[in-house]
Image: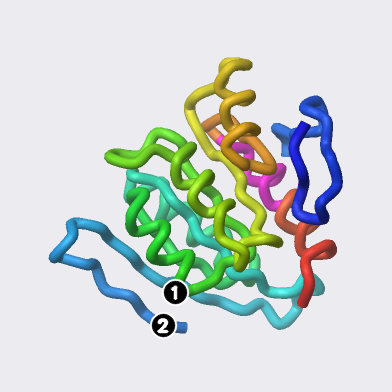
Amino acid sequence: MRTDRNNTRVPLEKMQESPTDSVQPDQSSGSHLDSVSGVDPLNEIPTRRILVVDDNADSAETMALLLKMSGHEVIIAHDGESTLEAASKHRPEIILLDVGLPGMHGYEVAQRLRTLPENENLVIVALTGYGQEQDRQRALEAGFDYYFVKPVDFSKLESLVKDLSRDLPD
């Protein structure tokens, strides 16, 4: 069991698989942050602030581009420390978080994010190559809300983001 963002107890089987400022690379710490934003005036779903976290720059940039094309504001981070920094600075509503990050892994990032009261409504989605049941359990315990195994079917992820957009406060 885990408490969801509305403080409702959610059984393990409910954990689903399925589905601005420009920030320059921080040369001093070795972390990299980028910002990409976009608005689709024809999109009926509100634009959401989404933080994409992946140590593979090509994967992160591709995901950011797809989300931008769907009308969302997107921030990119490539490691745990820059994720915490970006989450504090940009206050994303959704974080798409790779588990296998260099240094601080995604489980620890999720745990740290969950300790902060300002992240009460934050939705954390695992995008990972780890697909074993124990990996899913560990993600649930760390505070992830949803779990996707790479390669991610973008249409399922997009559907989840749209569903979440209906539930998140404007």
Q: Which mark is residue 10?
A: none
Observer-nearest residue: 94 or 149? 94
Q: Give the range drawn in magenta.
A: 152-159
Observer-nearest residue: 108 or 25? 108
Residue shown at the point (18%, 60%) measured from the top left: 29
Q: In which quarter of the image is the N terminus?
A: top right
Observer-nearest residue: 88 or 156? 88
Contact flag, marks 1 and 2 (Cβ < 8 Å)? yes
The residue beneath circle 1 is 89
Q: In this view, does 59 lie to the left or right of 66?
A: left
Label 1 packing within 10 angstroms: few (<14), some (14-19), many (20+): few
Q: Main secondary structure of the magenta part?
A: helix
Residue type at mark 2 is: Asp
Under circle 2, the secondary element is loop
Q: Image height check: is 143 above or below 71?
A: above
Residue 36, how many percent across, how many down? 45, 72
Observer-nearest residue: 116 or 15? 116
Q: Which quarter of the figure has residue 104?
A: top left
Q: How many numbered badges does the structure rendering display? A: 2
Residue shown at the point (48%, 64%) measured from the top left: 87
Residue 32, how many percent across, how many down? 28, 61
Q: Is residue 155 magenta?
A: yes
Under circle 1, the secondary element is helix
Q: Is residue 150 magenta?
A: no
The residue beneath circle 2 is 21
Residue shown at the point (52%, 54%) measured from the top left: 113
Residue type at mark 1 is: Lys
